Amino acid sequence: MTTRVGQYYTGKGDTWESWRMANMMSSQNKFCLYFLFHILKLSLECEDTPTSLMRYTVSNDKLIQFEIEGNIVVITSESILVQVDLLNNTKLCNKMLSISYRVESLWFSAGNIREIEIDLLKNQKVGDHLHITGGKIKTIKKHTFKDLEVSVLGLFSNEIVTIEEEAFVGLPFVSLINLSHNKIEWIHLRSFVDVPELIFLDLSHNNISRIEKHFFHFCQQNSLSIKLSYNRIESVDNEAFAGSRLTTVELDLNWNHIELLSFGIFQGRHFDTISLLGNNISKISTKFFDQHYDIDTLDVNFNHLDEENFEVLRNWALENNVSLPSLGNSRGVKIEIRVLSIFVALLVGKLV
């Protein structure tokens, strides 16, 4: 008796293992076909996209500028800065670029750009800086920024909501990524892969609401400055840094909605600075003061801490050699006192 399994056949006497292997091979083939179709579809989408007029300025090492218009950005000599206004184009594709000579800094004014082709700038000669700003980009897709030699990557002031797995991969020299002023809600655990020199990540002015377990898993380098100010963060999981190799951190969580100062997140690494200015912290857990932390500076100004909590925090900081910059400017205490003194002064006709 012969049984058909996908495109494979098992004859009489075949075992369950041979059937399982055949079925697995069939699944693998299906996956490969799907993956190939997906890649071809992405390529065809860009191939079928007409390229409209662009306006760009080229500045060379002699500070001479050339203003050019065309459907393709053509660079025929080494340049310090190339600024491209993409005008009415809605997709940023490799076919729009012919950069045969090294460009130190490439800056796109994205305007109406909604999508970026994967493997952007493949086989293009771009040096230190790449910026794509002011567009309507919603998603940074897998392998969008792959195998580039840039050191600074700016994607600020777009409309980015989602960053897919391996959106940033194989960037051996990148030291700064700026994703500020977008609408990012979450970061995939593997959004950033093989970025060993990354020392500054700016995610400020976004819509991130929680720092969950393994949030910083992508940080596989030793030190990093992370800017998360002006988000909607309400809580920070104690294991946010679980899986990370970071040993030295500068963490900016200013002007969020954090209510409780947790303690687990601060363990296991050195913090140059932890900034929690302008949150909703009204109480610090007693467990916080029972732990040992390696913190140089902790800023909790403009929160809702009462004087009792301040006093405990001051004593703890003194014992542990932690700097508390201008401690006392609490929204719940000092600001109200200052407003009251101004009001009284106005009543008596004399400003103190």
Image (cartoon, rainbow, N blue to C red):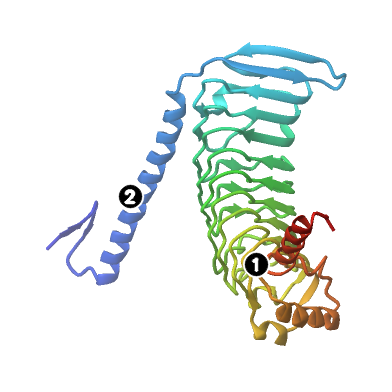
Q: Quadrant of the C terminus?
A: bottom right
Q: Is residue 168 above or below residue 46?
A: below
- Residue 244, which numbered label? 1
Residue 139 in percent (x, y) is at 49, 43
Dot 1 and dot 2 residues touching (CB under 8 Å)? no
User: Label 2's element?
Assistant: helix
Residue 289 seen in render: yes
In this view, which residue lies farthest toward the left? Answer: 1
Q: Is residue 270 above or below residue 137?
A: below
> Count the marks: how many?
2
Which residue is rendered at x = 67% and y = 18% of the image?
A: 56
Q: Quadrant of the N terminus?
A: bottom left
Three-letter code, disc 2: Lys
Mark 2, residue position: 30
Query: Quarter of the image holding residue 282?
Result: bottom right
Among numbered discs 1 and 2, the one appearing first in the sequence: 2
Please name the residue shown 69% across and 76% down the image: 306
